[in-house]
Amino acid sequence: MTTTEMPKKVKRAPAPSPAYLRIGKRYRANRVDQQYDAIVIGSGPGGLSAAGCLSKMGWKVAVFEQHYTAGGFTHAYGRHGYEWDVGVHYIGDMGNPKNLGRKLFQFLTGGKLHWADMGEVYDTVFLGDDIRFEFPKGQAALTDALKKAFPTEQTAIDTYFKLIRQISRAMPLFSLSKFAPSWLQPLVRKWQAHQLPADMFATTGDVLNRLTGNKKLQAVLTTQWGDCGLPPGQSSFLIHALIARHYLNGGYYPEGGASKIAETILPTIQQRGGDVFTYARVNNILIDKGKAVGVEMSDGHRIFAKKIISAVGTDLTLHTLLPNNLAVAIAKPEQQEQVTASMGHFSVYVGLNKSAAELELPKSNFWIYPNEHHDDNVAAFMAGADETPPLVYISFPSAKDPTWDDRYPNKATIEIVAAAKHEWFAQWQDQTWGQRGDDYEELKAHWQQKLMKVLLEKLPHIEPYIDYVEIATPLSTQFFCEYRQGEIYGLNHTVDRFQQRWLRAKTPIKNLYLTGQDILTCGVVGAAMSGMLTSFAILGLRKTVTLKNAIEHEQPTHKEPAKL
């Protein structure tokens, strides 16, 4: 088989995911109570984190997920004897017991979620044929490696890490505006105006251009731009700094796969009488006399709660769950226009009939670029002027997960992610998933061949062992996760996005709250932290202190359900 051909063993017929990958209870009207303390719409990390935090404080919470399994972009799926994660490829700093993200997951799961260290190298970047650079664990090791690769740029490298630290230290103050009560907001904004670094609200490209004119160094430093979906000329330096800092102490992977995140949070919600319901589509949020009071399900059933939390993104919340006259109370049209949907993507899922160890698959992720000109490459690709992907990301989950061989002996998996444009597939978006016709399948096959070619150029020895290949387009994300343009990162992480005051937990509609990656940042930890911040906004100062202390020390909160 040549690298431009489809693997001969590709199977197209969908097969259901194993039952153990389906987290949550299937919704039926007679399975839910009529009244809850809180309802959460959406079961991604933000929704589950908010539900888990409130449950730890004694609240009875119902989480409604329209998909067949809970977890949002942390869910996993199975096909033909293989398993892949759809959005979790690695998470940073989970080996540090002092890290707040780690503490939060320990708290939410009762210590049941475990993390596997990816080793000394977590990312490997390829810039054309000129540069291969490995990102080692630890800031000192990374600094030394960068200075060795770019010996004339030592001052720029030192200054870069100084700026990363400044942004990281400023994040608690930035986050305060996301959950502080309205009466405190003017004081918070005044404090932020004097204390937040100016580089927080500059583009990544502008900051790096000020540090160095070496484009290859800039390209290496911005290797992980795919983790937020924007190249450096467009992304806020805030998100770049957070991502870079997040991985300085190495990459980690959930033992047992990404589905373990939702699976281990679920019992916390159930212990207080709540539950996570799947196949549970919410049609709209019920408003009575200006207050959110419940939700109406797709079957017409109505369920009520004292607090309603939307964790499905601002776009779906404003344009589907709420009528327009109420949506504009949260964000006026001109405010909504200042934020845009993030980039769509292809995902290629590869199954191999040999173990990761036998195939010598790395734990390190591959970031493959045609050259150092990230922004120019993205612009050309999105304009259709060049079919060379501006970024191809390759992950090796079966090599990262120490439980994999016990669950799937003599098998391995690979995942490829690349940029895509929703408009390329928009003509098929109203057609049934799996029945979009030959033209759609041919276009998918075209891109699958291109991306498989990139993989096999790096790892040609795996070709005889390819047993299954499947590609997902932005329409798959649109169908399964209900992002209207197939975006995986919600709102674009631009400078304008981080200056939107309306992107916060509490909305102007009484008892209605937002959570998830749109109100803080993308990523599993960013979304989970937003869930924590939303619970702070709901609980008020005194109970927030109790909850925060419990998270910091990973202690229980209430033995008995707390009264609202």
Image: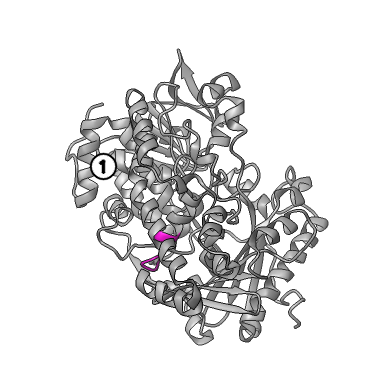
Residue 9: name its quadrant: bottom right
Residue toward you, 41 or 543: 543
Residue 249: name its quadrant: bottom left
Which residue ends up furthest to the top in the rendered image?
289
> Under tag 1, what secondary structure?
helix
Q: Is residue 359 magenta?
A: no
Which residue ends up furthest to the left in the rendered image?
559
> x%, y% of residue 374?
64, 62
* 480 to 15, vertically: above or below: above
Relative side of 409 to 481, left or right: left
Q: Is residue 246 magenta?
A: yes
Neighbour tally class for label 1: few under 14, some 14-19, many 20 plus, Cα within 10 Å? many
* Residue at image coords 61%, 26%: 333
Question: Which segment did they paint magenta?
Answer: 244-251
> x%, y% of residue 361?
52, 80
**Quadrant in which the C terminus appears:** top left
* Residue at image coords 44%, 58%: 259
* Residue at image coords 58%, 65%: 213
What residue sits right under mark 1 in the picture? 56
**Image colouring:** one colour
Residue toward you, 16 or 65: 65
In the rendered structure, which amino acid carries the disc numbered 1?
Lys
* 83 to 439, vertically: above or below: below
Relative side of 97 to 219, left or right: left
Relative side of 543 to 261, left or right: left
Is residue 489 at all visible to an observer of this figure?
yes
Is residue 405 at all visible to an observer of this figure?
no
Residue toward you, 253 or 35: 253
* 358 to 125, vertically: above or below: below
Which residue ends up furthest to the right in the rendered image?
439
> x%, y% of residue 39?
40, 33
Residue 225: name its quadrant: bottom right
